[in-house]
């Protein structure tokens, strides 16, 4: 699992460690790790052109000391001092002693085999300042390596408020930073490399599941399992206008590890024709029989309100999507106030805007604003509705009401297709019915859904939602 810590946590851990170490030791550890990554990225070090973009403070110092190490191995190292009067004196002196040179020629950026972005560190806010901003638009021939965070990206949130320098690789010191895992910041970070520097950190507020974590969470049948012990997921979806939403949600549910799927709604005939193993009724959730979780809303149309009310009245986890979210936004958080079982909400940014308006009053905030601040948006929704929120997007963010956050970066832009979200809802609801906790079910569902999209896209593009469901694998 990738663990990402807030800047405040990192600063506190650094201060505690520096108090026990000789002065400068921590920076030398960071510089050594940074230089080692650069060595692996260069075809050869001797004779390579390296440019250091050095701002003020420790971030610039890390880059300067790393540049000195590369210069001692024969690289031709040049440094642009963005704020000469505030450059890290020790780092600059060591670089010059190793044969590095100060330059003011912007063309060095285009000629370099490798550029070290040490302009702004993890404490930076806002976009690049005028002296540094032109580098973001320059043509490049080499690899850009960000020091701890790409300059112009908010390390805590991933927000990009202005101009930022896009990196091919980001070398993280001690821990990942949330802004490197969440778009739009993640799109600027490139490939992440973690360098240990000895920090003792508290539990991470933001995590990201890796393949081995997902494998450990997946529901597996035991020797004495039967279909009911494995869990039964109920799906209330579809309408006369959108029967396909029911079929797609059920397709996802069948792939999620539950032992059986019950369907309740007007598309029963279409569902059982496609999936004869599904238990169907043309009624509503209240009369469908016992389940361990409900999925409500995809393509529900005018019937979504009644289905939502019956599902929320149950004592099992409920996942709300699509038309169910529209109805919930109209009702506001009070609709969930008396629930004792968990609730999972799966909005895209437009639905998130309506949910926030329903919770806080006033007009819905612009969806583009929510997409640019997705970490804060997911947390706000989780707190307002006291529910686990899976905020869909290029980086899916899952937030629970207790403050925990997981991010998911699997997937492909080809998942932006009609019905893809219905598959995700059914898949995640099935994981809930199989016994996974809401945060686990939502983050595992997002991971599997993203991998299914990738696998489908490798075979053929464009990708359909049906193909996504067919490619879900445990």
Image (cartoon, rainbow, N blue to C red):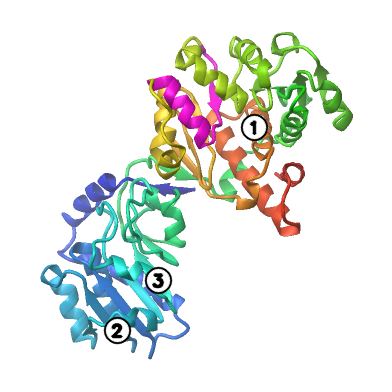
Q: CA distance from mark 2 to mark 1?
A: 52 Å
Could you tell me which secondary element the residue under label 3 belongs to?
strand
Part of the protein shown in magenta: 339-360
Q: Is residue 349 magenta?
A: yes
In front of the other: 26 or 173: 173
Of label 3 and label 1, which has the lower sequence position?
3
Q: Nearer the viewer, residue 417 or 423?
A: 417
Local secondary structure at mark 1: helix
Label 3 environment density (alpha carbons within 10 Å; few <14, some 14–19, many ≥20) = many
Determine if residue 115 is in view: yes
- Note whether 383 is above or below 54 in the view shown: above
As measured in the structure, the alpha-carbon distance from the residue carrying label 3 to the one carrying label 2 is: 14 Å
Q: Quadrant of the C terminus?
A: top right
- Disc on the earlier residue, 3 or 2: 2
Q: Which residue is mark 1?
A: 425
Q: Disc 2 marks which residue?
A: 77
Q: Position of residue 227 (x, y in %)?
A: 78, 25
Residue at the image point whose x is 41% and y is 53% from the top: 185
Q: How many marks?
A: 3
Q: In terms of sequence position, does the residue under pointer 2 or pointer 1 come before the other?
A: 2
Label 1 crowd (10 A; few <14 / some 14-19 / many >=20): many
Mark 3–mark 1 Cα distance, whole angstroms, equals: 39 Å
Q: Which residue is drawn at the image coordinates 72% and 53% (left, top)? A: 462
Residue 144: mark in rendering = 3
Tag 3 and tag 1, C-beta contact below 8 Å: no
Name the residue furthest front: 363
Would residue 55 appear left or right of 408 to someone viewing this image? Answer: left
In depth, the one of 92 and 309 nearer the eye is 309
Q: How far across and how far down the image is residue 232, in percent?
A: 72, 22
């Amino acid at each position: 699992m990738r663990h990402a810590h807030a800047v405040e946590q990192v600063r506190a851990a650094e201060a505690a460690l520096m108090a026990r170490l000789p002065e400068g030791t921590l920076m030398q550890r960071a510089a050594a790790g940074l230089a080692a990554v650069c060595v692996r990225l260069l075809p050869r070090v001797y004779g390579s052109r390296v440019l250091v973009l050095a701002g003020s403070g420790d971030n610039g110092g890390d880059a300067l000391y790393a540049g000195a190490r590369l210069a001692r191995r024969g690289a031709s190292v040049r440094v642009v001092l963005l704020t000469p009067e505030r450059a890290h004196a020790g780092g600059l002196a060591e670089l010059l002693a190793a044969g590095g040179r100060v330059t003011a020629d912007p063309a060095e950026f285009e000629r370099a085999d490798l550029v070290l972005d040490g302009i702004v560190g993890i404490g930076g806010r806002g976009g690049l300042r005028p002296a540094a901003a032109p580098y973001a638009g320059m043509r490049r021939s080499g690899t850009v390596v960000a020091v701890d965070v790409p300059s112009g990206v908010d390390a805590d949130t991933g927000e990009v408020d202005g101009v930022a320098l896009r990196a091919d690789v980001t070398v993280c010191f001690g821990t990942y930073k949330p802004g490197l895992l969440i778009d739009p910041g993640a799109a600027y970070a490139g490939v992440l490399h973690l360098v240990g520097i000895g920090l003792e950190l508290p539990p991470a507020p933001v995590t990201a599941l890796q393949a081995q974590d997902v494998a450990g969470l997946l529901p597996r049948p035991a020797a004495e399992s039967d279909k009911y012990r494995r869990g039964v997921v109920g799906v209330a979806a579809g309408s006369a206008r959108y029967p396909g939403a029911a079929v797609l949600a059920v397709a996802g549910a069948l792939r999620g590890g539950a032992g059986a799927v019950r369907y309740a709604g007007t598309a029963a005939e279409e569902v059982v024709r496609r999936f004869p193993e599904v238990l169907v009724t043309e009624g509503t959730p209240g009369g469908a029989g016992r389940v361990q979780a409900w999925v409500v809303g995809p393509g529900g149309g005018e019937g979504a309100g009644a289905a939502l009310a019956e599902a929320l009245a149950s004592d099992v986890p409920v996942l709300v999507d699509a038309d169910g979210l529209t109805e919930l936004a109209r009702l506001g958080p009070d609709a969930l106030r008396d629930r004792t079982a968990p609730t999972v909400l799966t909005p895209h940014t437009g639905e998130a805007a309506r949910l926030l308006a329903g919770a806080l009053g006033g007009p819905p905030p612009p969806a583009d604003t929510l997409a640019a601040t997705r970490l804060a948006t997911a947390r706000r929704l989780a707190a307002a509705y006291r529910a686990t929120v899976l905020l869909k997007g290029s980086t899916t963010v899952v937030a629970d009401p207790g403050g925990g956050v997981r991010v998911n970066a699997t997937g492909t832009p080809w998942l932006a297709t009609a019905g893809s979200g219905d598959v995700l809802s059914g898949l995640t609801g099935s994981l809930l019915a199989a016994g996974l906790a809401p945060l686990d079910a939502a983050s595992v569902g997002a991971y599997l859904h993203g991998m299914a999209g990738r696998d489908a896209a490798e075979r053929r593009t464009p990708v359909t939602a049906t193909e996504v469901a067919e490619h879900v694998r445990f």
